Image (cartoon, helix red, strand yellow):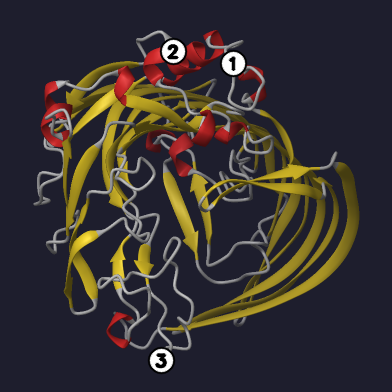
Amino acid sequence: TFNGRILATDGAGRDFAYDVLPSDVISGADVIKGAEAANTEGAIGGLINLRSASPFDQRGQHGIMRIEGDRNQMSELDGFKFSGVYSNTFADDTFGLLLGVVYEERDDRTDIAGNDGGWTRNPDPNDESWLWGNAWGGNIDPNNNGVLDPEEYGLIGPGQFRVGSILEEKKRTAYTAKFEWRPTDNFRVVVDGLKTKLDSPQVGYQQSFYPLYAPGRWSNMEITDGIVTSFDMDNPDPEMRLNPELLNQTSYRVVETELYGVNAEWNVTDTLTLNADLYRSTSSRHSGGQDSYVVLRMNQPNVAHIDLTGSYVPNVTVDFDDGRDLAQGLANGEFGDSDFNTHYFSLEGDNIDDEITGAAFNGTWSAEMGWLDNVQFGVNYTDRKKSRDLINNSLTGGADYYSGNYAINVGDLGGGVISNSFTLPNFMSEVSGNFPRSFLAFDIATYQAALAAYDGTPRPDGGTYSYADAAPVWNPLQSYRVTEETWAGYVQANFVADRWTGNVGVRVVQTNTTSQAWDAKILEIIENGAFNYTAVYDDPSSITQESDYTYVLPSINLNYRITDE
């Protein structure tokens, strides 16, 4: 929450991404780990309330401007931030105004390595948790006798692994304003607003290697402690050799978040305080079809060697039949469009809109009767509407439209898809091993334009290529509409003594929800290759559901101070 109000979020669920809020707009934070009746329900593990400053925190006229700069010595990337705040109280301190602005630009880099494809492992009849194995087309068979020998039970070998770097250009803007009116010492009205925009596109350049085992694919295997630590890949079959892949993974993230509200507080008497609050919060992120996971696969004959050395990344050497070497060739810019075929072409992203209207009426009665310090009570109302529309090309099989038998030599697309080779400063500098540390850049927009220009060229299935068949479309199977209307009432008694404090209370929450989603039957499953399938769906049908429920949430907390310190 922000000033006790629920902030709309650009996530698919309720989770909030704190990177949309610059730290400069926050003056403090309350972290509440215990459950109390007076606090907003629904928090998992704790409630965090962020607070903004008030012009009455420091009366009079004040202003500050600050410029910060930073440089990352590893990535050699820079960033800067400008922030300014103006605050003033006037008319005998009955009015206060606070204005703030933040603008930030920062280039970030994250180097990554992983084995998302896991490991190849033989079945082990002696291990009930691993009776089947996961080798592609057959068990790892070092002696090539076609039989799973006892010494081959549970044998492990490398699967898919990758190395790369994610480059992010982050721009963040925030505007804040707060106007306060305090006509008397016991009454005040606050009107405030917050508007932020996060523009944070990411481009990830990666190299992926798929040395998954298949009969006839590995030779000269070396095995240590049940693990294949070294092998060659010298099968000339294009589907059996190692075909290194270039991966371009982009993320389009532009988030606009707003929060506006009005709050009034009245100290009715010395013992009774009433507070009323009304607010509106919105968040939107429209990245539908603009995120990409695009792979180009090398098409040149080669012999490869994989070696596990105990380092974080295996040794990978690839010698091409024409005399080129993968690592050296990437560093020297020796590879171009014609060395690659089109492959996986995933375009996706979701459009998310979140709208929250909230109101609250709260009160505190200072009892000061023995251990009873005060009693809190109130009523809260929220009306939340959230929609998600997933836009992708996997639903129609578009992600595989240019792969497998339908792959195109990238050189036939007219050139200019692969732009240049580059090396990042200090990339994996603390990781030993012999693997490629240079990258080839290709721009997704340029690649899409080249594919579209290829329209009309004959396709192996008898038709012609049409980019429209691979383009992203609305995916109803992962889209939804949700509304949630909540009324909550609570009462909580707070106790204080010399060495202990505590509270007891109850919160009653009544919720009405409506939801809409879509379903479709699977008509056919098309096999595109090993572990690669496309489902063909029937026309989607809408599913709607309404629900209401009431929860009674009692709470009790007790703190005892064992020592005076």
| 560 and 197: which is toward the camera | 197
Sequence-wise first label, 3 or 2: 3
Mark 2 or mark 1: whose residue is earlier in sequence: 2
Q: Is residue 177 visible?
A: yes
Percent coordinates x, y for residue 32 in the rendering = 51, 64
Image spot of residue 400 (x, y percent): 56, 35
Residue position marked by numbered label 1 in the rendering: 458
From the viewer's perspective, is the residue at label 1 or at label 3 nearer? 1
Q: Which residue is mark 2?
A: 413
Position of 155 with respect to 135 (left or right) is left
Could you tell me which residue is drawn at 44 percent across and 13 percent down? 413
Q: CA distance from mark 3 to mark 2?
A: 53 Å
Circle nearer the N terminus (1, 3): 3
Asked which secondary structure carries label 1, the reply is: loop
> Which amino acid lies under the numbered mark 3 shown in the image of this protein?
Asn
- Residue name at image x 31 percent, y 71 percent: 141
Q: Residues within 10 Å of mark 2 (few under 14, many from 20)?
A: some
**Outermost residue, front side:** 145
Q: Residues within 10 Å of mark 1 (few under 14, many from 20)?
A: few
Tell whether 519 sits left or right of 90.
right
Tell me, for residue 126, which label it has, or none.
3
